[in-house]
Every structure is written in C-alpha cells, then in structure tokens.
Image (cartoon, rainbow, N blue to C red):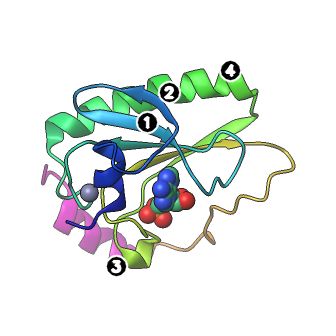
Amino acid sequence: MDCIFCKIANGEIPSTTLYEDENFCIILDIGPASYGHALLLPKKHYANLFELPEELAGKAMILVKKMSTVLNEAVECEGLNVVQNNGELAGQTVFHFHMHMIPRYKKDTVKIGWKIGKLSDEDRDKLAELLADKI
Ligand code: AMP
Ligand code: ZN
C-alpha cells in the first residue's frame, strides 16, 4: 500500500523519531504548524479513528498525554492542542490514523477554531434520542 506513514513506520522513509514502541511511533511533523509539532501514529495501518481498535486507542491517548507533558516542559509553550482529523472534509490529508500535538505560543500562526453556533430544542432532542446511551 502506498501510505507515507506506513513507510515511516517501516523505516522506508526517514523521520525524526521522538518515541517508538511495538505499536506506535511519535515523530516530528515535517510541516510543523508550530515549534515542536509532533505526530503519534500506529505502526499498523488504520485509515482513521473509526478503524483504530479500542485497545490501541487507549494506548494512543496515554502516549499523547505523556508526550504532550514532555513537549510542554521542553519547548516552554503556553498551550497545546491535540488534534485528530478523520476524512478529507475534516482536514485529513494522510489517511493513516494519527494524532497531532501542537504546542501553542502567544505569537504563533496556528488556526484551530469554529464559530459558536446555536443548538435548537429540536436538534437537542433529536440528537439525544439518536446518541444517548448508545456506547
Ligand atoms: P492531517 O492533515 O491531519 O492528515 O495531517 C497530516 C500531517 O502529516 C501534516 O501535518 C503533514 O505536515 C504531516 N506529514 C506529511 N508527510 C510527512 C512526513 N514525511 N513526515 C512527517 N510528517 C509528515
Ligand atoms: Zn499506513
């Protein structure tokens, strides 16, 4: 499969690796949004969060917490976003599950955000019926 993150995980493409274990790599993003932007990726190919097994999802979150803590202290950022995109419409460009850790600084140029919307009573009731107690 022609997947850039599979190639990175297999060592076919070089990367700056910050951490590695049997399941995951954490690497520096090649096009960083800010100083210290890192990516966690599983060594096996899962296209997105929906495909990722729950057991790996739990492990990924623990590693992201640990690496974010290390980053936070090392680069002395003033905030940090954890971002994870699923699907082209959501901004995913590499279709191998990954989580971004993006340190934030007062004068950075990172844009992550949305306009605060309104939740109608109708949508609230419909969504609650669709989603509550389903997991
Ligand atoms: P996303 O838009 O969430 O799919 O993020 C993909 C990320 O992968 C972007 O931030 C890219 O800069 C990063 N990226 C693409 N190719 C490489 C690579 N060879 N090494 C490290 N990061 C990469
Ligand atoms: Zn892959």
Q: Main secondary structure of the magenta part?
A: helix
Amino acid, disc 1:
Ile
**Mark 1 or 3, nearer chain start:** 1
- Is residue 124 shown in magenta? yes
Q: Position of residue 30 (x, y in %)?
A: 58, 53
Q: Which of the marked residues, 3 or 2, is nearer the chain's N terminus?
A: 2
The residue stretch that appears in magenta: 120-135
Q: As shown in the figure, which amino acid type bears the numbered disc 2?
A: Met
Left/right placement of residue 88 relative to residue 50 reads right
Cα–Cα span, label 3 and label 4: 45 Å
Q: CA distance from mark 4 to mark 1?
A: 17 Å
Q: Is mark 2 within 8 Å of ligand 1?
A: no
- Callout 4 environment at 10 Å: few (<14), some (14 to 19), or many (20+)? few
The residue positioned 36% from the left and 48% from the top of the image is: 8
Quadrant the N terminus occupies: bottom left
Q: Which residue is mark 2?
A: 67
User: Is disc 2 placed on a helix, strand or loop?
Assistant: helix
The disc label shown at residue 73, or none = 4
Question: Amino acid under label 3?
Answer: Glu
**Mark 1 vs mark 3: in front:** 1
| Residue at image location 29% in from the left, 63% down from the top | 3
Kindly indicate whether the residue at mark 1 contacts the one at mark 2 (C-beta within 8 angstroms): yes
Question: 94 or 70, which is in the foreground?
Answer: 94
The image shows residue 69, relative to residue 33, as above or below, that is above
Q: Where residue 69 appears, x then y in whole percent? A: 56, 23
Q: Nearer the viewer, residue 40 or 30?
A: 30
Q: Which residue in the protein does label 1 denote?
A: 26
**Looking at the image, is mark 2 or mark 1 earlier in the sequence?**
1
| Residue 27, x across and y down, in percent | 48, 39
Q: Earlier in the sequence, mark 4 or mark 1?
A: 1
